[in-house]
Structure formats: structure tokens, C-alpha cells
Amino acid sequence: MSFDVPPDCRYQESHEWARQENGTVRLGITDFAQDELGDVVFVEVPGQGESIEQGEEFGVIESIKAVSDLYAPISGTIVSTNEELIDVPELVNEDPYGDGWMLEVEPADESELDALLSPEEYENQIA
Amino acid sequence: MTLRSPPIEHETKATDFGGWEMPVEFDSIRAEHEAVRERVGKFDVSHMGQITVSGSDAQRLMQRLTTNDVTALDPGEAQYAGITDEDGILLDDTVVYHLPESEGEYLFIPNAGHDEQMLDRWNRYREEWGLDATVTNRTTEYGMIAVQGPDAPNLLGDQTDVSLNKLGNFEVRTGMVAGADCLIARTGYTGEKGFEVLCPWDTTQQVWDALDCQPCGLGARDTLRLEMGFLLSGEEFHPEENPRNPYEAGIGFVVKLDTEFVGRDALEGVEAEGPEEKLVGIILRDRGIPRSGYTITSPDGEELGTITSGTMSPTLGEPIGLAYLPVEYVGDKHPVRVVIRDEPKKAHTRTTPFLS
């Protein structure tokens, strides 16, 4: 089985991705992670204005069969959350890098992204 | 320890279930669950045990080691039953078959990983009571496939010479399925119409392949049985970790106190006094999922019990669970809290089955 690992993201070993947008960073969980979890039914993340810290727990994702902690791939302040996931959590399964995104943050230090895995390195990890 | 492998090759992720390496999901739990509720799905349940009991005292031995009334079974009939110890504590739950065309021969189905223990138990009591019975563990002689869902009679009907429409609930027949000599029982664990097919081990793959429908794993098996409030051995009861009697577990209807069986006297006392706790359904009203081990409290924080199993119900779209609570919580709409990650979440009780 092969999993989608887009080239424009950086990755954390705990299977979260981060992607630079216009001055902000979007993040979510990877295709591999959503497949491991199976049917996602519930995502719990902090709200706008709250801070997250690289490598620290920032929320929880639940599928029918499992519950899993989410770890922040980058530090920063949350500028928006994906409201759609409240009613349609299965977007995480259907489009993990697109409509299934979780947070958009104002990064505290963009160079933190360099500490994350490159797409090639992440692909190696899940191979 | 080496895991036991089922007789079917599954190209999907597997997990240790009662010492067997069994598939968790094939496509997605939700897709498999919906297939069974709306159409039909198949499950490899070869991890279930099979023990046969024959000989002139076979009926007496079965009667004295299971809680239901085995004498009520004609050949070709089956019943659900508990297996209890001297204190009336559930060791396992099972289906007992009076084998068709074999007056006085029985087959019962212990849960995954319980076959050796039950074989020993049956042999020990047979010796102690001096009964004439032969007890044989046939767990690796039989594969077992459950075919469940509203279309199950059509799907299985196309593969067998048995008239399935004449097969009543909890009845069993011998017959050919996809060229294999099988036992077909109208039983299941999903709440849907359906059958369980016992096939000679080496023919299980061919029977599986002939049943052209959604393959389902243990994940969907669990969500389907939870919507019905059915017990899972090891979760809703466990002789050491969660010792429960059949009245607490809500299966008092399979305890026949007018028969002689191990645990009867203790259960007579429980029945007379009434249990202090009972298994009740829980529906969460806040967001979250009640999972095994989570604490349940009253709205003002008094600890009441623990979730034994829980999931997001794919059919209802609501988080559901089972828990033992004081009997005053039996019934609908008693407000409780489920503590999830240190947060009390609003929930209420619900009479099972969750699906009406």
C-alpha cells in the first residue's frame, strides 16, 4: 500500500504535517495516519488565539477503533481552526492534506520547520 | 507465544484476539458496518471454539455445565447459555447446539481462546460425576463464517441445498455450501438476519470465496454487537478482572433455576435478592467516545461505575457504551457523566438494544 506524501509539506515522526502558506502554517495529520486510525469520528483542538508548542500535545483525534494524541509540528498562535471537522470529521480520511486540515497558526519561528522530516525522510519512515 | 491463524488468508491488518491473528478491518469499519445493516457481509469467526460432547450422558453433562435448559433442545435446535462457576460467576457465554440427525450429540461454541479451558472443565466434571461422555475439542477441525444482513438468505441460499427459509431462529441443519459439507445455523452477533456456517477447516477458504459480499473484520463485529447491547466475553464479564453473574450482565433469561447446573444455588440467591448492579446502555450527549475503562459518575461527581465497551455507533451517529451501574440507573434517561480525559461529559442511560 502506498500513501500520499505531498512534496510541499514537512513532517513530524508522530505523523503530523505542516505546510507554509502566506505567512502562516497549516497543519494536520498524514495520509498514513488517517489510514492507521480508520474512520475518524471526532477531532478536539484548541481554539483561535491559543498557542501550541512544537513537539507538545495539542489535541486529540478519535476514530471508531482508537483514540490518539496530536502533536504540534511547529510552535505558534492559532489563527484559525477547521470548523468543518466538527460536523464532517471524515474529511480527515477523505482529504488529509486538503479539506481535512486542522489548524492554521502564526508561527513563532519558521525555522522550526527545518527540524521536521522532509517528504523523502517521512516516506522512508512509513515504508 | 505464536498466534493461531484462521483457515482463510486475509490480505489486511490483523490483531491478536484471544490468541488468534484476526483481521480488524478490510475496507473501513463504517463501510463494513453499513453493508451488514443494509445488505450483507461476511465475517471469518474461525477463532470461535468448537467442542463436541457425545455419549449416553452427553445431555446430562451439558445440562450441568450450562445455565440454560439443554433438555428443551430437539436435534437441530440451538440455545444461548452462560457457563458459570460455583459462585454463579460467568466464565464464558456460548451457543449450545443439539446436532441435527444426531440425537444426544451436542456442540458448543466457547469464545476465542477459551476452548482448552472449557475442554478441561468438561472433562474434569465428567470424571468427578462419573458420566459416560466423550468431549472433543474440534476448534481447529472447523472453520466458521458468519453471513449477516438482510440479504444473507439470498446470498447464502445461492450456495447451498438447504432451504434457508425453513430454518428458524436458533435452528441448525447440515448441508452443502459451495461444495463443502457444513453445518448451517441461523444465529449471529449483529442483530440482523443471518447465519453462521461451520465448515471443515480445509474447506473454509472455498466457502469464504464463494460468498461474494463485503468482508468484515473484528472492528465492525464490535460496533454491530454493541448497537444491540450484546456481551463480549472478556469485556462485559471476566472471571478475574470483572466477575459478573448472568443477572448483572442482563442475561438472566438464559438461567433456568429449575435445572441442575454448577452455579445454580448461588444464582438462586442472586435472583431472590436482585443484583445490586446491572449492565446498562450509555449514550453520550457531549462530544467524545466512551471507551473501556472510563469512569462514570453521577452529575454531582459520585463515582458509579466503569465503561466496559464503547464506540461511535455508525448507525445512530451517536457515541454509545455499556457499563455496570447501581440498579436504580436501569432504564432510560438517567443523567450521568462519563469522565473522558479528566473532563466529565454529559451522558444518559439507555435501555439496550440501542437500535430499535
Image (cartoon, helix red, strand yellow):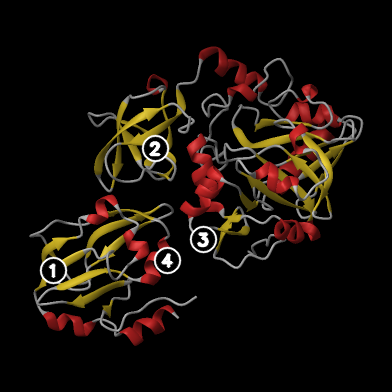
Q: Disc number at residue B185? A: none
Return the residue at label 2. Answer: B306
Identify the secondary structure beneath mark 4: helix
Q: CA distance from mark 1 to mark 4?
A: 25 Å
Q: Position of residue B172 (x, y in %)?
A: 78, 36
Question: Could you tell me the amino acid type at mark 1?
Answer: Val
Identify the secondary structure beneath mark 1: strand
Sequence-earlier tag: 2 or 3: 3
Which quadrant holds residue B354? Answer: top left
Instruction: From this view, report whether residue B105 is shown above or below residue B252.
Output: below
Q: Are marks 2 and 4 on the same chain?
A: no
Circles 2 and 1 in contact, beta carbons < 8 Å = no
Chain holding disc 3: B
Return the residue at label 3. Answer: B27
Closer to viewer: mark 2 or mark 1: 1
Classify 10 Å Cα crowding around label 2: few (below 14), some (14-19), many (20 and above). Answer: many
Q: Are marks 2 and 3 on the same chain?
A: yes
Return the residue at label 1. Answer: A105
Question: Could you tell me the amino acid type at mark 2?
Answer: Thr
Chain holding disc 1: A
Q: A117 or A91: which is nearer to us?
A: A91
Classify 10 Å Cα crowding around label 1: few (below 14), some (14-19), many (20 and above). Answer: many
